[in-house]
Image (spheres, rainbow, N blue to C red):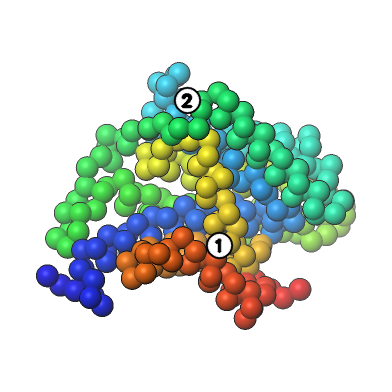
Amino acid sequence: MTMIFGIPLQAFLGQLLIGLINGSFYALLSLGLAVIFGLLRVINFAHGAQYMLGAFAAMLMLEYFGINYWVALILGPIVVGLFGAIIERTMLSRLYNLDPLYGLLFTFGLALTIEGTFRYLYGAAGQPYSVPAQLAGGTNLGFMFLPIYRGWVVVVSLVACIGTWLLIEKTKLGAYLRAATENPVLVQAFGVNVPVLLTLTYGLGAALAAFAGVLAAPIYQVSPLMGSNIIIVVFAVVVVGGMGSIMGAILTGYMLGIAEGLTKVFYPEASNIVIFVIMAIVLLLRPAGLFGRDA
């Protein structure tokens, strides 16, 4: 049997795959957080609840309307994104000129409200969501068995991350978004509707969280607690990458997911804290994060 550092190759690669899958969710979720913070300067504590809403949207669409996974993968993020846009337009936008702490407290309260509502309606226990038939089963790679759906998650999350980065950094709309956050008065003077741009930005961040939730539904059980279980780790990922750095969020999400997976091979006892240890070390050496800019 082939060994790597005294570990069977199959076990090593299996944990590497799990780390890559977790990293895919970390990247998608931290990307949404980075978009909202980088463009709106809002620390969105409701991001985990929006991730949970995406998973529940997929499950409820299937249960009540017979809408399959493929349609839910598009429709779920749109619904949650619209919900986020309404929240931003009617409530969050009133807090932009106040201390950022108000935005954090509002989104924290919103997260508790959403989670508490779903716990009341559906209980705390998780509910299953089936893998779509087209992605069921797996492929034998010789050295390991690769579930097709998990491979799909890695690929589609990478595509979504790169697509979002290109939208923000390389398109005219992205230029307007970045300019509106830097100097909204000047951009408004050129005839651009800045409030609508800010609403679209928050809606995009919420939709990215929901997209990750739909992807996660067939892997993890759909539960009101699934967002609160992952959001603290995602905040650590964003801090390590650099608050507001979109590319930093993507790269750090995958890197820390892999680091967590490999830690489960070599030192399982530390797997639950390794991301936070890395965060502490990075903040000591580079307070702005790996890809962040110093104030």
Quarter placement of the C terminus: bottom right
Left or right relative to 77: residue 66? left
Left or right relative to 293: residue 276? left
Could you tell me if the residues under marks 1 and 2 are in contact, i.e. CB atoms within 8 Å? no
Q: Quadrant of residue 203?
A: top right
Which amino acid type corresponds to the residue marked 2 in the rendered image? Leu
Across and down, in percent, residue 233 comes to 54, 57
Q: Quadrant of residue 196?
A: top right
Mark 2 burial class by Cα count in 10 Å: few <14, some 14-19, many 20+: some
Residue denoted by label 2 = 60
Q: Is residue 16 above or below residue 5?
A: above
Residue appearing at x 19%, y 74% in the figure: 3
Residue denoted by label 1 = 237
CA gap between label 1 and label 2 equals: 30 Å
Secondary structure category for the residue under label 2: helix
Mark 1 burial class by Cα count in 10 Å: few <14, some 14-19, many 20+: many
**Can you see residue 192?**
no
Residue appearing at x 27%, y 47% in the figure: 148
Across and down, in percent, residue 54 comes to 52, 37
Q: Which mark is residue 141?
A: none
Across and down, in percent, residue 21 comes to 38, 55
Across and down, in percent, residue 218 comes to 37, 39
Residue appearing at x 61%, y 38% in the figure: 81
Quarter placement of the N terminus: bottom left
